[in-house]
């Protein structure tokens, strides 16, 4: 039995198990190599994010209904990109972000980097590539 990653017997950052199952390339019958095969985590990461958010909510370190800019080191524009004189929409909350109802445009361009040199830290990436607000939150 492997020690749990958070137990004192397993230092942070230490790999406790690395196994490969199935094929990395089915057509060529190349098996998964846990050291070299890359899998995109995609929507699976949402599960971990929600769990962490809910744990912080239980500890009263986050508020799902607070304006999300309270937790950011940059501002989200308080207007809709194509609002044409409409009043400012309500602020975006953590709940809006977590339920995909913040009203941001949906774009795919720039989601992947082809080289390590093109990678930006997450906070910088979000500031540089902030999607436009196209719908009111909710």
Image (spheres, rainbow, N blue to C red):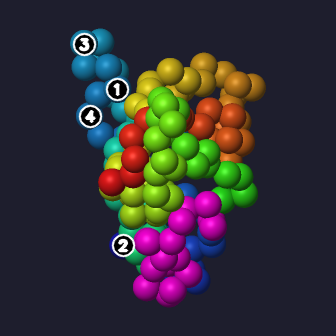
Q: Which residue is mark 1?
A: 24
Q: Position of residue 67 (x, y in %)?
A: 54, 65
Residue 51 placement: quadrant: bottom left
Q: Mark 4 near mark 2, Cβ–Cβ under 8 Å? A: no
Nearer to us in this view, 90 or 12: 90
Where residue 49 appears, x then y in whole percent? 44, 60
Callout 3 secondary element: loop
Q: Distance from label 2 to label 1 (Cα)?
A: 27 Å
Label 1 – label 4 distance at C-alpha? 7 Å
Q: Residue, x 30% and y 40% (percent of image)?
A: 21
Q: Are discs 1 and 4 less than 8 Å apart at CB?
A: yes
Residue 1: give its label: 2
- Between the residue at mark 4 and the residue at mark 3, the CA separation in whole angstroms equals 12 Å
Q: Tag 1's secondary structure?
A: strand
Few, some or many residues within 10 Å of mark 1 (<14, 14–19, 20+): some
Quadrant occupied by the N terminus: bottom left
Splitting the image into 4 quarters, where does residue 9 fall? bottom right
Q: Which residue is mark 4?
A: 22
Residue depicted at 47% across the width and 62% down the height: 93
């Amino acid at each position: 039995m492997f020690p749990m990653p958070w137990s004192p017997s397993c230092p942070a950052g230490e790999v406790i198990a690395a196994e490969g199952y199935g094929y990395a390339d089915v057509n060529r019958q190349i098996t998964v190599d846990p050291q070299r095969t890359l899998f995109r985590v995609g929507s699976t990461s949402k599960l971990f994010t929600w769990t962490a958010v809910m744990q912080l909510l239980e500890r009263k370190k986050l508020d799902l209904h607070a304006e999300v800019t309270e937790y950011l080191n940059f501002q989200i524009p308080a207007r809709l990109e194509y609002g044409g004189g409409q009043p400012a929409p309500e602020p975006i909350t953590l709940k809006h972000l977590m339920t995909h109802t913040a009203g941001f445009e949906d774009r795919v361009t720039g989601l992947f980097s082809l080289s390590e040199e093109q990678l930006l830290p997450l906070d910088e990436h979000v500031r540089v590539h902030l999607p436009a607000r196209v719908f009111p939150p909710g």
